């Protein structure tokens, strides 16, 4: 049997959550066409195998499954994608977003803690494990036949295995961040064995060690083909890991965070906004033509370090840019007090599924006391009081859409010019699934992480932000059309990070790192209370899925 399925079975995923694309019946199949890419094909056509199966690995990050078959069963296919799994865990129960349909599983997240038998817990956990298993399977297969390759084939194999190591670390980041102590599997995991549940700190150390090794292997080679990962993504993941090291290990590692942030900043600066490497206008990053600003893109400015490619012709999903437009917006009628339309976003669908909490709205600068318009370009696509929306969150149910919060829409299906103006002539048609890429990590996040690393450990909200940290904070503000702060505090830096990176799957992680997740900051309907209440102390982690715990005899997280 192939290692891929053995890994799934040993961690309980295949038995309880998988209908893995074409991987049904014959367990020797890889996640693609069973007639063409079995492991036996590798020895006869190693290049064909590597190119096709590596493509399938990337598909697991971009869509819900190969050949339009959902990899996670018993859970909505669109929700089971990599981006939406992270969004469920990182955004829905924060001040930035919620989920109005209130279905029994997904809908409970907007209020806080969820039980271990929640299907969305199993679905999100399974998504990250599936992607890890795909990466491991590729590496194991290639390693097993490596000495039969010629020099050209070995060069390709080495590069693809490096990419798999980066992608695996990317999936493990969300696993340890959200679930804590999880199973560890790598290319050395014996086929058929049950991966050992390691501590969060142990997995942290393994992941950063491998990412450090990958960056060393790349040396000065920053070349990255569009849609793939490379040295820059490895460096960016190290920034994310080290920024949160104290949470994961008990030991702060801000010096290491700053080291890798500086590597990226020094590499990318020279183009774009004030030569910073940032794109000229914020909306450039979230439009239909944002591919040009990715690694390997056509623009000299490449702020999007790790992208999930989408293309309305051949690579689309119910996640990524589609989700980030359709799930927020609604189509108003003459009877509605609120006004919103698909046409405003050049979209083909409108789900009326999400609003934002009042406390998040209040973090922005507004021209009016009732939050109608803002000088901050980052709210350029929002629906606000100017569109008849109520900033308050009287209830988080879909029936009251328009009366229970603003729409914090970040993406659109329009193309933008470098000044952030809609370029209608070069925009695609309004379709139900759109083709703009999803930026997983941007250079702006790296600047803000560097600034936070400079502030250091054990600080209070009132600590002054000075020097390059203040320069980076003001750089982000100027790009958003705001004035410089002459003095700033750590609380100002936190709020700037929230404004810049909203709904980009950072919020829960950030609030935990700042000690503001359980208590110290509240928002409407936090912990099921209309005006907000503290979360229980154990809720710094989600539960491991109960079915996985029972099958593999893992230790459940405290409180569940």
Image (cartoon, helix red, strand yellow):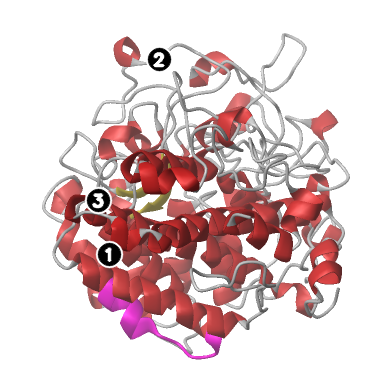
Residue drawn at point x = 88 percent, y = 45 percent: 104
* Residue that badge 1 annotates: 472
Which label's residue is closer to the chain start, 3 or 2? 3
Magenta stretch secondary structure, dominant: helix
- Cα gap from disc 2 to disc 1, whole angstroms: 35 Å
Residue 473 in sight here: no
Which label's residue is closer to the chain start, 3 or 1? 3
- Callout 3: SS: helix
Q: Position of residue 549 (x, y in %)?
A: 81, 70
Q: Is 5 placed left or right of 44 in the picture?
A: right
Residue drawn at point x = 23 percent, y = 31 percent: 418
Image quarter of residue 446: bottom left
Q: Is 413 placed left or right of 544 in the picture?
A: left
Residue drawn at point x = 64 percent, y = 62 percent: 7
Q: Nearer the viewer, residue 204 or 254?
A: 204
The answer to whether the residue labelled 3 contacts the one labelled 1, judged by CB atoms less than 8 Å apart, is: no
Residue 68, compared with residue 20, is above or below; it is above
- Residue 188 drawn in magenta: no
Residue 456, compared with residue 7, is above or below; it is below
Q: Is 420 placed left or right of 8 in the picture?
A: left
Q: Position of residue 296 (x, y in %)?
A: 23, 41
- Cα gap from disc 3 to disc 2, whole angstroms: 39 Å
* Residue that badge 3 annotates: 153
* Residue that badge 2 annotates: 428
Q: Which residues are the magenta region?
A: 249-261
Residue 460, compared with residue 311, is above or below; it is below
């Amino acid at each position: 049997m192939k290692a891929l399925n053995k890994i799934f079975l040993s961690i309980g995923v295949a038995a309880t959550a998988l209908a893995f694309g074409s991987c049904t019946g014959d367990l020797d199949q890889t996640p693609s066409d069973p007639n063409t890419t079995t492991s036996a094909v590798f020895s006869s056509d190693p290049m064909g195998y590597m190119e096709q199966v590596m493509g399938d690995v990337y598909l697991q990050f971009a869509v819900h499954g190969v050949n339009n078959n959902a990899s996670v069963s018993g859970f909505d296919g669109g929700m089971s994608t990599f981006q939406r799994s992270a969004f469920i865990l990182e955004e829905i129960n924060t001040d930035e977003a919620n989920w109005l349909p209130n279905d029994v599983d997904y809908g409970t997240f907007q209020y806080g803690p969820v039980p271990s038998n929640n299907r969305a817990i199993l679905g999100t956990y399974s998504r990250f494990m599936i992607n890890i298993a795909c990466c491991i399977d590729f590496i194991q297969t290639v390693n097993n036949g490596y000495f039969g390759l010629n020099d050209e084939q070995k060069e390709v194999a080495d590069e693809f295995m490096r990419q798999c190591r980066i992608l695996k670390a990317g999936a493990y980041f969300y696993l340890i961040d959200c679930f804590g102590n999880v199973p560890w599997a790598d290319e050395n995991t014996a086929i058929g064995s049950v991966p050992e549940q390691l501590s969060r700190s142990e997995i942290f150390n393994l992941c950063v060690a491998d990412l450090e090794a990958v960056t060393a292997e790349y040396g000065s080679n920053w070349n990255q083909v569009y849609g793939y990962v490379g040295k820059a993504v490895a460096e960016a993941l190290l920034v994310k890991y080290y920024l949160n090291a104290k949470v994961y290990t008990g030991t702060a590692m801000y010096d290491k965070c700053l080291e890798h942030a500086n590597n990226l900043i020094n590499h990318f600066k020279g183009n774009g906004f004030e030569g910073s490497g940032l794109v000229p206008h914020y909306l450039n990053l979230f439009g239909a033509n944002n591919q040009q600003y990715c690694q390997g893109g056509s623009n000299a400015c490449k702020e999007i370090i790790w992208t999930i490619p989408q293309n309305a012709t051949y690579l689309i999903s119910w996640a990524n840019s589609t989700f980030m437009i359709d799930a927020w917006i609604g189509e108003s009628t003459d009877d509605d007090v609120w006004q919103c339309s698909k046409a405003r976003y050049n979209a083909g669908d409108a789900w009326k599924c999400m609003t934002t909490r009042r406390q998040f709205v209040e973090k922005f600068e507004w021209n009016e006391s009732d939050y109608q318009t803002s000088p901050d370009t980052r709210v350029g696509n929002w629906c606000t009081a100017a569109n008849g929306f109520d900033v308050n969150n009287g209830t988080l149910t879909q029936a009251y859409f328009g009366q229970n919060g603003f729409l914090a829409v970040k993406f659109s299906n329009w193309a933008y010019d470098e000044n952030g103006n809609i370029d209608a002539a070069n925009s695609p048609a309004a379709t139900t699934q759109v083709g703009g890429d999803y930026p997983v990590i941007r250079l702006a996040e790296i600047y803000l992480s560097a600034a936070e690393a400079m502030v250091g450990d054990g600080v209070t909200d009132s600590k002054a932000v000075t020097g390059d940290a203040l320069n980076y904070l003001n750089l982000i503000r100027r790009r958003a059309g705001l004035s410089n702060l002459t003095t700033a505090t750590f609380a100002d830096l936190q709020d700037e990070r929230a404004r810049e990176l909203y709904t980009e799957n950072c919020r829960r992680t950030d609030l935990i790192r700042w000690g503001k997740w359980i208590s110290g900051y509240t928002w409407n309907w936090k912990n099921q209370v209309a005006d907000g209440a503290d979360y229980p102390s154990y809720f710094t982690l989600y539960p491991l899925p109960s079915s996985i715990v029972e099958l593999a005899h893992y230790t459940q997280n405290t409180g569940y």
